[in-house]
Image (spheres, rainbow, N blue to C red):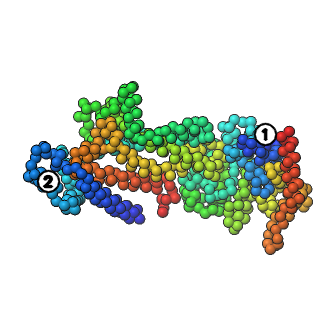
Amino acid sequence: MSYLRIRDLSVVLRGTRHRLLRGVSLDVGATEVMGLVGESGAGKSMIGKAVLGILPRSAKIVSGSIELDGVDLLTLPPRQRRHVIGQKAALIPQDPLTALNPARRIEPQITDRLVDILGWDRARARTRAAEILHDVHIPQPERVLRAYPHELSGGMRQRVLIASAFAAEPRLIVADEPTTALDVTVQKQILKLIFEMQARHGTALLFVTHDLGVVSKICQRLTVLYGGLVMEEAEVGAFFDAPAHPYSRALLAATPRHTDPTADLTPVPEAVIAEARRAVAEADLRWHS
Amino acid sequence: MFLRRLLSRIATTLVTLLGVAVIVFAVIRIVPGDPVAMMLPPGATEADIARLQAFYGLDKSIPEQFFIWLGGVVQGDFGTSITTRQPVLGLVLSRLPATLELSVMALVIAVALGGTMALIGTRQRYTRTEGAIDVANGMALSVPDFLWGLVLILLFGVLWPVFTISGRVSPNLVPEFTTSFFLFESVVRLRFDLWLDLVQHMLMPALALAIPLAAIIGQLLKQSLKETMHLDYVTLARTKGYSENHVILREALRNAVLPTLTLIGVQFTFLIGGTVIIERLFSYEGLGNMAIDAVINRDLPLIQGIVLLFALLFTLVNLVVDLLYAVLNPRLRHA
């Protein structure tokens, strides 16, 4: 039984018939780690945003369903939808430097949801915040709770954001390229931390990335997107042994090898791109008719 | 550290005030118009004029006059008003509370009105409501305060006379007060009958001063709120299950207020300057009204005293804004 179940989701650029997501279907099991890969502009982040109800104003959902824990979010009134998302899902954002409110201390930024949405009392929420900061290996959690974001390093802030995401025990976490903005040296630690927390809490994780290397290490399944269209959805083991779709094969071939950094990068061949575009055009033809 | 900053601040303030004093002193003596000529009847003799000029020290050179005056000022003696023959300091201080209360009331109204407009505009962004607010702001902004004053007098003083449009308080109530801060005193003493009478007098001039400022605050705060609403931490807060109102008030407002605050400081000093004409318009017994009388009567010491006080007020407002800024912006607190 999948915890997140997306069916035939289409998102258009507001005011046009141009689709940004072209009938995406996707399942994430209750404790599963699903990698969402594709080039920039493929719509991978957009899926995460649609699930969390934070699509930009310029994007509009026109068809499909997003079921979270068996409830179709798109049929709920806005208020209730927000509440359900706040209780059951959480986001680990891309850029830790901009994702914390500069005018507020760390503590309320973690505890607000516990108090306002889950109805905990302040003292309990505070204890929980200190606990969860300890879990993400932050020394002196008490001091960090009183700090303002500008007093913490980038890696530290990302730890805080991970803690904040897990604090309310959500059943689904969307991680939107959570290490892209970080130093290479910190990236590894943060990745390790996210999967350590995921394993401990048994959360479903939708991991948006363009790094197939990371996907091969930690995801159980992955979905490859091109132009807002699902190219392939596969078990990670099977995918890396023999990707089924030509685009997936090309993408895999284009991934830089850490073992031989001097090797030339292989671009995705024109023919493969042309084929992927054809698939997109066919999907649009069917949709518009 | 704080003490050093405060001391340097006071030093700059003193230099500013000295500059203001020099300029005002020179200008009002260079422009035509002789106070002595205005005091004497048409047929006065040369000897009478010379005697009176000597009495007020006006026969000496301007630099000489300036240093005599400055010597008095540092000892707290701002000279004697030529028209009323009373000490300038006492006169000015007796009127200052009236102007302060009017300005602060106008500021409170402007912040309340502008803030509400900005919040509603942000909540209803990209809708017709926001468009309507923009239009209203534009209109409020393109009409200066004294014209608003005339409009208000016409509307609520003449066509539909619900407010008193002359004076600060009903004359028969003046003996009830022991201080010059009438509005403040009425609140502290819980005399709401007096308070009501005061508000009835002050609301229209305060509103005339507040409307343009409210429009500026509304526009800038809305702009800055809308920008803040796109920032990552606001988006993150949305995923936590909060309502739009909650997100605006708790996540965005405090950050969006900072640029507006600086502007409010600058604009508030303009507002204090605006009281001069507004007080005249509403026959409000404040400093501004007194300033106009002083200029008409060429009451040089009084003009100097008033201008110096205004200059002091302006620098104080800027100081308060800087302090508030540091309080609201945690990044500045340790700097």
Answer left or right for B335 relative to A157.
Answer: left
Q: Which quadrant would residue B94 be assigned to in this image? A: top left
Q: Which residue is mark 2?
A: B53
Q: Is A59 in front, or is A137?
A: A59
At 82% from the left and 71% from the top, the residue drawn is A264
C-alpha separation, residue under disc 2 versus residue under disc 1 = 90 Å
Q: Which residue is mark 1?
A: A63
Q: Is A286 in front, or is B193?
A: A286
At 25% from the left and 50% from the top, the residue drawn is B303
Percent of width and height locating residue B2: 40, 62
Percent of width and height locating residue A174: 73, 51
Quadrant where the N terminus of chain B is found in the figure: bottom left
Q: Is B139 in front, or is B17?
A: B139
Do the residues at pointers 2 and 1 share their chain? no
Residue most extreme to the top: B160
Q: Residue A264, relative to residue A176: is it above or below? A: below
Q: Secondary structure at mark 2?
A: helix
Q: Residue B251, relative to residue A268: is it above or below? A: above
Q: Which quadrant would residue A269 be assigned to in this image? A: bottom right
